[in-house]
Image (cartoon, helix red, strand yellow):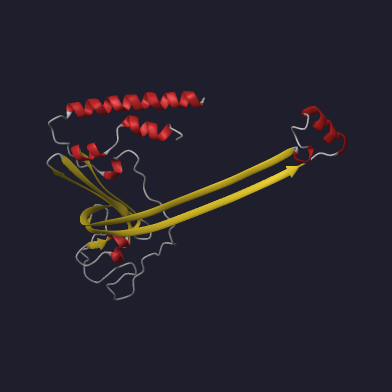
Amino acid sequence: MKTLKIATILTLTAALGACNTMDRLASVGNAPPLTQIQDPTTLAGYQPVRMPMPEPIADTYQSNSLYRTSAKGFFKDERAHRVGDILTVMVTVDDSAKISNTSNRNRSSSNNAGMGGIFGAAVENVTAGAIDPAKAIDFTSGINDAGAGSVNRSEALQTSIAAVITQVLPNGNLVIEGRQEVRVNFEVRDLIVSGIVRPSDIQANNTIPSTKIAEARISYGGRGQITDVQQPRYGQQVLDAILPF
């Protein structure tokens, strides 16, 4: 069963590699194409966000008053608050992590056993004195393990992207999603941002920092000739996945 699974993986990998090779040959001399602008809600795999919601509050009006209970202000608010509205996300990522672990383990044991009486005499007669019955059995074992690991990571990203409100949750929170593509020569830079924001966190200039986004999903990468050179070949990736050493 395991052999069949490995063979299936190798076959699929070879097919994908062949498709990738044909795609690369077809795009020789051409810049990577940009994707068409699409409605995110129509893409395959899109699912509306469902989160725990508080009890809804019905609008109430007071006599001789222009206010209602759900109103955010007396004057019209120009900040994004409806499906289809656009707001600017200020993406700021400045993370660093440094971890170092060292472990050592040692164990040793030694056991001796001898035989006397009839058994000892029998062993001595059979071996003609080559084996000392007092030390007929001797066990010795030892274990010595040492391990060390370290992580030193630093990431910094500062940019901005316009996102579209794709859904308004029952409690008023906004689901946003934005995608940006920039092509320079033969390399395309992709930036994707999505998550849930509170309308009150949107600033007066219709911007919101990425640190205010709940369930944030931020992807920054690229595709093109430079990215392709930096990636290991499919065969190497398959060997890294299946080789036990």
Residue 10 place in picture, x, y as percent: 39, 25
Q: Residue at x 18, y 26 (%)?
A: 26
Q: Is residue 38 left or right of residue 117?
A: left
Up/down of 26 relative to 206, above or below: above
Q: Residue at x 44, y 26 (%)?
A: 6
Residue 228 place in picture, x, y as percent: 23, 37
Q: Residue at x 68, y 46 (%)?
A: 110
The answer to whether any part of residue 166 appears in the image is: no
Q: Nearer the viewer, residue 125 or 226?
A: 125
Quarter residue 57 falls in: bottom left
Q: Residue at x 13, y 32 (%)?
A: 30
Q: Is residue 112 left or right of residue 21?
A: right
Q: Nearer the viewer, residue 58 or 242?
A: 242
Quarter residue 111 falls in: top right
The answer to whether any part of residue 51 appears in the image is: yes
Q: Nearer the viewer, residue 131 or 40?
A: 131
Q: Residue furthest front?
A: 129
